[in-house]
Image (tube, rainbow, N blue to C red):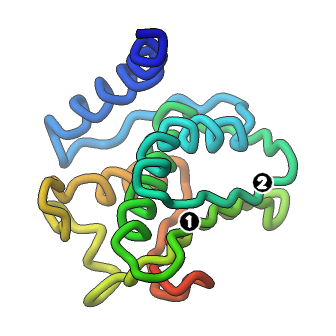
Amino acid sequence: LENLNLMCKNNLPLIGQIIETTLDGNRQISIEKRNHDLRNTLEKAISSNKEISSLRKVLIEVEAPKPIIVPHDNLQFGRVINNLIKNAIEAASDSTKPKKVKVTLAEKNELSIQLVIEDSGNGISGPTDRIFRAFRTSKIRGTGLGLLISKKIVEAHEGSISASNLSTLGGARME
């Protein structure tokens, strides 16, 4: 019950935000930027995916050597990281290769942060730019909204997101 309570406490705000965003796929994403440690936002997203990674026997490797204090909406950006990690775990678990997800967070310069999530899955089939379109999914139970919403959140933070099959692990790479 303690674990269930903790999961509810951590995920109910996230679920509420997802419901709000999916009600109108065309509206602007609202963000409230405050100085937060992006590494903490990353760690929370990884923590909420521990159970699925354990069940699917996927190792998550993290390279985030130092705190990175940057203005961002930690709830909204946490949604992005959570979605990308969950997708990577699901892709890696379908692979015959060693099941692994690698997450790298680094400051490129004083104005730019780079977050890369790679998996050992089978990669992205078809043109990689299409995965950010609404209702595109390869999952049986997917809505096709996760990557579209993630893109909107990243762009609301004045960033960009790209997908490729250039993963060092042999699967997909989200940057």
Q: Residue at x 67, y 60 (%)?
A: 61
Q: Identify the image quadrant of residue 111.
A: bottom right
When the figure is inspected, residue 161 is found, relative to residue 167, above or below; the finding is: above
Name the kind of residue labelled 2 in the image: Ala
* Residue under pointer 1: 101
Q: Nearer the viewer, residue 44 or 164?
A: 44
Q: Of the residues under marks 2 and 1, which one precedes in the sequence? A: 2
Instruction: From this view, report whether residue 67 is shown above or below residue 102.
Output: above
Q: Nearer the viewer, residue 50 or 166?
A: 50
Position of residue 14 measured from the top left corner of the image (x, y, whole percent): 38, 29
Tag 2 secondary structure? loop
Please say if 172 is above or below 4: below
Q: Quadrant of residue 141?
A: bottom left
For the point 19% across and 40% down, the residue is 22
Q: Quadrant of the N terminus?
A: top left
**Residue 66: % across, % down:** 87, 48
Q: Which mark is residue 64?
A: 2
> In the image, what residue type sits under mark 1?
Val
Q: Nearer the viewer, mark 2 or mark 1?
A: 1
Residue 101: where, in percent of width, then height?
56, 65
Numbered disc 1: secondary structure? strand
**Image height check: is 158 above or below 108?**
above
